[in-house]
Image (cartoon, grey):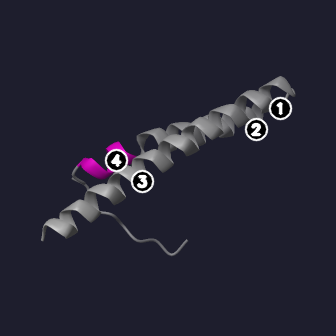
Amino acid sequence: MSNMMRDSQIMAQTNDENLGYMSDMALELAQMAEDSGLATLAYLFRMAALEASTANSDLNVPDDLPRQVTSH
């Protein structure tokens, strides 16, 4: 049982590191796009960075609203 808990903890830490890396990379790409005059692309990269930085907090919040499945 302790091996499973340890493995789970390692996987969670790796996931956190990956999300942090993705957020940092998206911010760097946003800056490069902004420097090149591509404001819309910079905005999209900033939104991607925000999504990556908040992805973990979304997993820890209980879902009070039921998810609806749509056909599109």
The label shown at residue 41 is 2
- Amino acid beneath label 2: Leu
From the image, state whether disc 3 or disc 4 is nearer to you.
3
Span highlighted in magenta in the image: 56-61
From the image, state whether disc 3 or disc 2 is nearer to you.
3
Q: Residues within 10 Å of mark 3 (few under 14, many from 20)?
A: few
Q: Residue furthest left?
A: 1
Q: Residues within 10 Å of mark 2 (few under 14, many from 20)?
A: some
Mark 3 or mark 1: whose residue is earlier in sequence: 3
Judging by the rendered image, the residue that carries numbered circle 3 is 15
Q: Residue at x 78, y 30 (%)?
A: 32
- Amino acid beneath label 1: Leu
- Amino acid beneath label 4: Asp
Residue 60 placement (x, y as % from top left):
26, 48
Residue 71 placement (x, y as % from top left):
51, 75
| Most common SS among magenta residues | helix
Residue 38 placement (x, y as % from top left):
83, 32
Judging by the rendered image, the residue that carries numbered circle 4 is 58
User: Are the residues tagged 1 and 2 within 8 Å (C-beta)?
Assistant: yes
